[in-house]
Amino acid sequence: MKRRSLLKAFTLSASIAAMGLTWTVQAAETIKVGILHSLSGTMAISETSLKDMALMTIDEINAKGGINGKMLEAVVVDPASNWPLFAEKGRQLLTQDKVAVVFGCWTSVSRKSVLPVFEELNGLLFYPVQYEGEEMSPNVFYTGAAPNQQAIPAVEYLMSEDGGSAKRFVLLGTDYVYPRTTNKILRAFLHSKGVADKDIEEVYTPFGHSDYQTIVSNIKKFSAGGKTAVISTVNGDSNVPFYKELANQGLKATDVPVIAFSVGEEELRGIDTKPLVGNLAAWNYFQSVENPVNKKFVDDWKAYAKAHNLPGADKAVTNDPMEATYVGIHMWAQAAEKAKSTDVDKVREAMAGQTFAAPSGYTLTMDKTNHHLHKPVMIGEIQDDGQFNVVWQTQEPIRAQPWSPYIPGNDKKPDHAVKSN
């Protein structure tokens, strides 16, 4: 009797062990990747589409056989435009969900929030948005623009004859690290071009700000002192009331052009763009660029949006951070294939020098030392259909300068990734 019971017990435990083994094998058959974007709160207007683009790209990679014979499995979290929550969710992705890589963040304050976590745990973050530079972490690959790939060329354009020969500048931004650091760089750059402080107005508003009546009125007054341009680093859903107020007060691009660094096709979807025609944005990609790679990219995205019933799928658009997300995920996949591993240290090494034929029409290269992409610069003019007509672009991709030469002491900083803490 005892022997039979023992035999049954042994058989049962063997079955359970086998089941456990099966579950382990199944779990090991996928590679988990984290998606860390705000799907609620003030930044959801910009970040939700990046989550969806990441999912589309993951599907694309899986359809071609995954990575090293394993399928990718997305783990999506919502840090809800809450900066400390980014760190919490980042830690969860790395320690509990055991993801191999994370694609995410938009604002620099969210990236700064998660950075110590990724450096502590040796995680890997791909950051897809233009930013202020002044950072070069071994745990981050920056697929958006550094200031010399967006902000500086944009202001040079505004000062040129083609850009309107601006002599006075309003630096209008959301009150956090990206606008303030970018404007510190731009003020120093403008000084180097002979622009005095009396011809530079600097204004900041909190996240989610919606009343731009006084600010736009003051811009009109300031512009009476000479040819003026507005450089906007306003982020998130505040862009909608800002642009609406420009239209309300009849401030046209022919009078005072606005060039934006955080407004693309996605942000313009909810606005009547007819009064904004002629205003500008500086990016490294626009949906309107014509080449076969971009045609497929746009068509695939529209089809994905329709198939997944995404909000506003009938008017689905692509934009620069979406392209940077797409490029970053594909580059990471290429590096993991090259390394034959998703181990962070091995992938980091394999990322150096990776290239990718991007929808922008350029072949982008991941710099061998500074963890930033070499990117083209484009300036687009808003059209009445919410698209951009590219009025200026560089011939070739530009190497990023994460440490801006316009900030004293940066010439002594190393040109390779170093931990920030």
Image (spheres, rainbow, N blue to C red):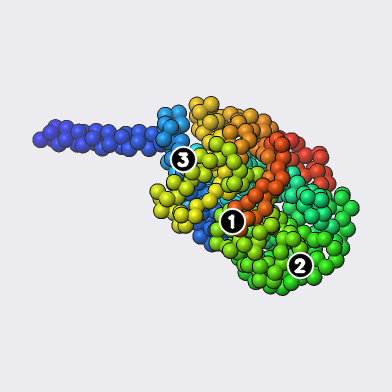
Q: Is residue 117 toward the left or the right of residue 185 in the image?
A: left
**Which residue is found at the position 44% from the left and 46% from the top?**
303
Q: Earlier in the sequence, mark 2 or mark 3?
A: 3
Task: Check disc 2 and report the residue beneath it.
Answer: 219
**Label 1 environment density (alpha carbons within 10 Å; few <14, some 14–19, many ≥20):** many
- Local secondary structure at mark 3: helix
- The kind of secondary structure element at disc 1 is loop
Name the kind of residue labelled 1 in the image. Answer: Gly
Type of the residue with mark 2: Ile
Give the residue number, with chain letter if any, for mark 3.
58
The alpha-carbon separation of the residues under discs 2 and 3 comes to: 44 Å
Check the image and report above or below for 202 versus 11: below
Mark whose residue sits in front, 2 or 3: 2
Q: Nearer the viewer, residue 6 or 28?
A: 28
Q: Is residue 269 above or below residue 360?
A: below
Q: Is residue 6 above or below residue 41?
A: above
C-alpha span from label 1 to label 2: 24 Å
